[in-house]
Amino acid sequence: MKPLAARTDDLEQSFIRAVSKMINAVDGINLGQGICDLPTPEPIKRGAQRAIEENRSIYSHYAGIRRLRMAILEKARRFNRIPASSVDEVVVSAGSTGAFMAAIFALLEPGDEVILFEPFYGYHRGLLRMMGATPVYVTTRGPEWTIDFDAVERAVTPRTKAVLVNTPANPSGKVWSREALERMLALARRHDLYVITDEIYEYIVYGDRAHVSMASLPGAYERTITLSGFSKTYNMTGWRLGYAVAPEPLAAKMGLLNDLMYICAPTPLQHGVAEAFTMSDDYFTQMQADYDAKRARLCETLERIGFEAPPPEGAYYTLASFAPLAGRREGFEDDRRACETLIERAGVGTVPGRAFFADPEDGRHYLRFCFAKEMPVLEEACRRLERAFA
């Protein structure tokens, strides 16, 4: 038979899903995939149930129901300080991944280059490559994951069209400061680049850190597409609802692409998630406090068993280094072997560090742990790690 499309040649199951299958096979605890097993808030569930009972089951506007888009617009203006002014600047899609697909298909031609910061979220790289764009990597190093702007400058070529900024970042937990975003904006303006920002973890920051949206900076909005969604904030990863906020000319093209690729996001679930905007700000305060306690519990455990695990600045992952164990403890020769060792000896699943770097050697001594778990589950995972390795 004739061959499949060439774009499938390098596709393989992500490490994250592969580890999930391995840990399920031993009935272990999955701290690898960011599936967030906490309950979805009741107002959202009731809103979706009501929409189903009222037969709100037909296609919505391809960019989302008006009530939800208006709520997102108000949130973007109030929380993110983005100077959007019209509902036509909001596109609701099938998860933030769907919004990312609409964004890159609207912006990029095959062969265009996009600067991607390592460690990166694997789906960003995979989707860029699938549509024919070329990721150009700028590597950051833990534990601070500081951006080397001289390296960014060197990475720009005549083919560079966009930069992708993930803040708070998966997997590193890095939160970009206002100063770093201003330097990135200056570079983007100097080279006439677009900026795609993935801000899905925007409400999950710790200590004195504050989330700053690139599009809120003076002169940034005209060249910025801001991606976010509901999966992480409201524990509803399987609902597949996300959105983009962008200047109307960009949003219009993204909406048309969203129509072609997805028709629309699930209508009754859009009605459900619209209820999220009626919830008190106390929800976010409590969520941050809960994640802060879980962050401390996991990182302290990892430090006790020999990892280097400085607490992340945001999101709900720690990209922990087991370099101190690599030369002196069997089963920690590299990231894949260490991942297998934690499953075999403790029944705890993680993600090998190579999943987040173009060169596997750069991730050789890292494992990513997710602490978006009910506290009793996370406590049990920590006890298992301590029994096996302390």
Image (cartoon, rainbow, N blue to C red):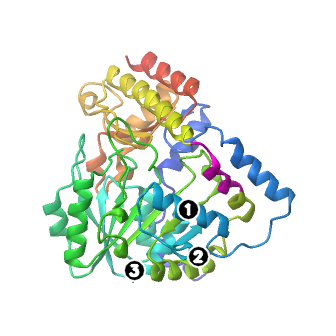
The residue wearing badge 1 is 72
Q: Is residue 297 above or below residue 277?
A: above
As for residue 273 lying within the magenta part, the answer is yes
How crowded pointer 3 is (Cα within 10 Å; few <14, some 14-19, many 20+) is rated as some
Q: In the shown orientation, is residue 18 left or right of residue 196?
A: right
Asked if residue 306 is positioned above or below residue 94 in the image, the reply reads above
- The amino acid type found where label 1 is placed reads Ile
Which stretch is magenta? 272-280
Residue ID for mark 2:
258
Image point (23%, 56%), residue name: 180
Q: Is residue 141 left or right of residue 243?
A: left
Mark 2: give few (<14), some (14-19) or many (20+) Cα within 10 Å: many
Determine the CA span between mark 3 and mark 1: 26 Å
Element under disc 1: helix
The overriding secondary structure of the stretch rendered in magenta is helix
Residue 263 placement (x, y as % from top left): 67, 76
Residue linked to disc 3: 108
In the picture, measured across the screen, residue 112 lies left or right of residue 53, that is left
At label 3, the amino acid type is: Leu
Is any atom of residue 94 visible in this view?
no
